[in-house]
Image (tube, rainbow, N blue to C red):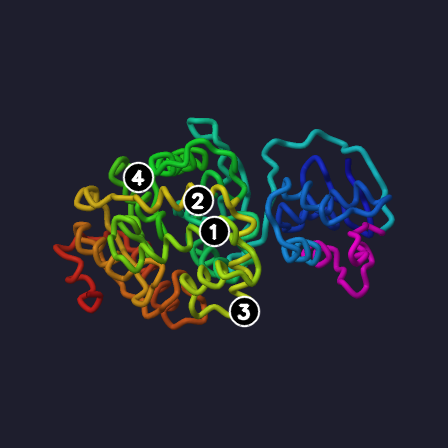
Amino acid sequence: MIYRFAGFELDEARFELRRAGEPLAAEPQVLSLLILLVENRDRLISKDEVIEKVWDGRFVSDAAVTSRIKSARRLLGDDGRQQRYIRTVHGKGFRFVGEVEENEPVQTPSVADAPTAAVPGADRQQRIEFCSAADGTGLAYSCVGEGAPLIKTANWLHHLGCEWEIPIWRHMAGALAKHRRLIRFDGRGSGLSDWKVDDLSFDAFVDDIGVVAQAASASRFDLIGTAQGCAMAIAYCVRHPEKVQRLVLYNGYATGWRLRGAAEEIARREALLTLSRSGWGRENSAFRQMYTSLHFPDASAEQADWFTELQRVSVSPETVQRYEDMIADIDVRALLPEVRVPTLIFHSRDNKAVPFEAGRELGQAIPGASFVALDSPNHLLFENEPAWIKFTANLWDFLTEDDVPLHSSAAEKEPDGF
């Protein structure tokens, strides 16, 4: 069905909102919300029904629903004061109140049509698509930007559908897409990928990189990993050296926290694992305060709230337990000397989530790797940090260099890194 109102066309079959015939950039959950409200405009839609239909009943907060309502209103030129199209009945729910004309679509939609979302700072559109791993697990991936392919491995707490709204991720994604065709995907068990997954093993995550690369028609590409995604990128690079042109590792490690052996870190991680059983994603919980301060000690209240929101929408508490157990025992130390592609390593000096020594280990063991130390305590850099400028400058110098020579040691490339 195509719904027409106030110069807009909401095309259910093509999953598209148009104005004057031109598609508008809209996040998939916002479009799903609009369709739900317009289809059921004769009645009030409760918050619980919104969560059930738009998020498939997953764990989300009131803030998530409010955020999507605001985004839908902005698309329509509406706001919470006027409520010309979307009316809020406090404590009850929402209702679409605009005058709507229904029409059957004139032609069959193309299977190539896909949800799109605006990319800040890149003037591009991302397309969210799906592919299947060897075991049948559905993986959500997106391509955005133009140029040589750059694949970002899946990492903990990731959601393609809301990444562009989150102040701890959007500047990173936008920067990576500025000069490359950026290919990102939600890891199995999280985000828009299948949540109910039997296999959450390290090898399954490594194999998924190749699955997404093939689906995105990337035969040879640069590869970037963050956190545990670095170990996955290393393993993929060693197993498929013909596929990877350059390797970037950001705040990563070769061994999981149990194997690193630091008593203080193990105790802290075990405590977080225990708290996650009841505290995952909850507002103002002891878990939230510990988890946020560990990863983002410099976070503002807004950034901390978004990080909590990302916990809620990215993964279930049950999967958190399984995933943490998997990453705790990661060990790719034996693979580090086998990396044979140009490699650039970044690590925050005061990172409490992943110790600086873990990044040094990567730089010292990977042949010819270049190492850049970042003066920051944060696991992900904020764009207002001086280290952000250093990061982006070194990243693009590395990725745009036509012929990157291998060096005899990491210290020769960046002596102050160690």
Q: Nearer the viewer, residue 305 or 27?
A: 305
Q: Which residue is mark 4?
A: 236
User: For the image shown, how many numbered marks are present on the structure?
Assistant: 4
Q: Position of residue 393 (x, y in %)?
A: 34, 64
Q: Which residue is mark 2?
A: 321
Task: Residue 35: name its quadrant.
Answer: top right
Query: Do callouts 2 and 1 mark residues in contact (Cβ within 8 Å)?
Result: yes
Task: Residue 344: name its quadrant.
Answer: bottom left
The tag earlier along the polypeptide, 1 or 3, is 1
The tag earlier along the polypeptide, 1 or 4, is 4
Q: Which residues are magenta?
A: 71-97
Q: Identify residue type, mark 1.
A: Ser
Whole-number angstrom distance, CA of label 2 to CA of label 4: 25 Å
Q: Position of residue 334 (x, y in %)?
A: 19, 42
The tag earlier along the polypeptide, 2 or 1, is 1
Whole-number angstrom distance, CA of label 1 to CA of label 4: 30 Å
